[in-house]
Image (cartoon, rainbow, N blue to C red):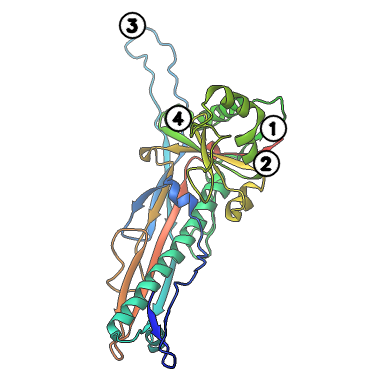
Amino acid sequence: MSELMNLFTGQNASFASPFEFANKQNKIITSLGLFRSENHDVNKIALDRIVDEKMLKGLERAMHVQSDWNSASLPEFGTFLYQMKYSNSLNSVTSREVEEYRRRGAIVEDSIAAVLSDFSDAQYDQMANTVEADLISALLALKVESQYAGQGDLDFLELAETTKTGFALDISSSANVFQQLSAINRVVNVNLGTSLAQQRTGTIILAAGTAADALHYHTSIKDFLLYTVPMGSDANLFTQIQGANPAYESWMLKGNIVIDVTGYTQITDVIGENGFVVIPKMSDASNAYVLHTGIGTRHATLGKESGLYHQYITTDPQWNYPSIATETAYLPIVNIPDAIVFGGVA
């Protein structure tokens, strides 16, 4: 706080820190770290995709006939070209911003630095929100829509020639939630296949409304916890005061991390206000979820380094006022769309 002297009374008054409401998006999908980043030095990539994989099984052969052999068939791959999505943001410092930021005794350079710092934070948040929206679409809607990318809209279910996997969660008083979670995990493992299932590292459940309540307070869960977990334990869902995430309550249930996303419209618009989605966490080596990142395109030399966001400053040679720009080029890919289970309550 700074102090101001009243010229007429001689009394001091202090400037109080203002209350600022931060209208920022909670980037749940980004923070989960499901996507492995893969950097590229161009914004068009060639991806190999299996188009025909045969079930291998050797036939019985005569033991002593030298010419009687089986042979193994390799998967057939197709190479597909994809162009990344692109977004940017540009802000120029003007004398108006400098005047608004200027404090008594401050030099112009300090005011310009303060303006640039605020523009930098705002642009990063703007681009991060853009990426978060597309990660939500890729992971939960199983598609990436694009107006300018060469391939247009990507539908991962269509590319994998499969359909969305669903599950109806029985929340009646006689139902067993633990048993149903086991059934869901079996479905996930079957759809992953033996090889990919071995690279599974965990499970994330995003639930909203009635589904979230059922996964937290259902009778079968209450009866189990009250008699097996001490009342004061952090693991007891019924005596917890606050979850691990103050913004969105989360808890562990039968080895699954459950996050209550009630009220987060970007997610509930996709999974439903009373729905849930079960997402298998996979090792990076599986390439199940990949976020391909590219380079900036607007400047001749700047913004070409590896990374998701490219921010740089340029200066007007005539007036010497700087501009700050942020660019991002990216494409999220989901290679296991049928292993993500979408559900509702029954």
Estimate the x, y position of residue 313 in percent, counting from the top left: 31, 75
Amino acid type indicated by mark 1: Ile
Q: Is residue 276 above or below residue 292?
A: above
Q: Earlier in the sequence, mark 1 or mark 2?
A: 1
Q: Nearer the viewer, mark 2 or mark 4?
A: 2
Please give left or right for residue 120 compared with residue 225 in the image.
Answer: left
Q: Secondary structure at mark 3?
A: loop
Q: Secondary structure at mark 1?
A: loop
Q: Earlier in the sequence, mark 1 or mark 4?
A: 1
Q: Secondary structure at mark 2?
A: helix
How crowded is the residue under tag 4: few (<14 C-alpha within 10 Å), some, or many (20+)? some
Please give left or right for residue 59 compared with residue 23 in the image.
Answer: left
Q: Mark 2 and mark 1 in contact (Cβ < 8 Å)?
A: yes
Q: Nearer the viewer, mark 3 or mark 4?
A: 4
Q: CA distance from mark 2 to mark 3?
A: 65 Å
Q: CA distance from mark 2 to mark 4?
A: 30 Å
Q: Earlier in the sequence, mark 2 or mark 3?
A: 3
**Camera-side residue: 328 or 17?**
17
Amino acid type indicated by mark 2: Thr
Estimate the x, y position of residue 280 in percent, counting from the top left: 49, 37
Please identify the quadrant where the N terminus is shown: bottom left
- Please say whether residue 102 is visible from this viewpoint: yes
Q: Nearer the viewer, mark 2 or mark 3?
A: 2
Quickly name the residue at label 1. Answer: 171
Amino acid type indicated by mark 3: His
Residue at image point 54% right, 53% down: 137
How crowded is the residue under tag 1: few (<14 C-alpha within 10 Å), some, or many (20+)? many
Q: Earlier in the sequence, mark 2 or mark 4?
A: 4
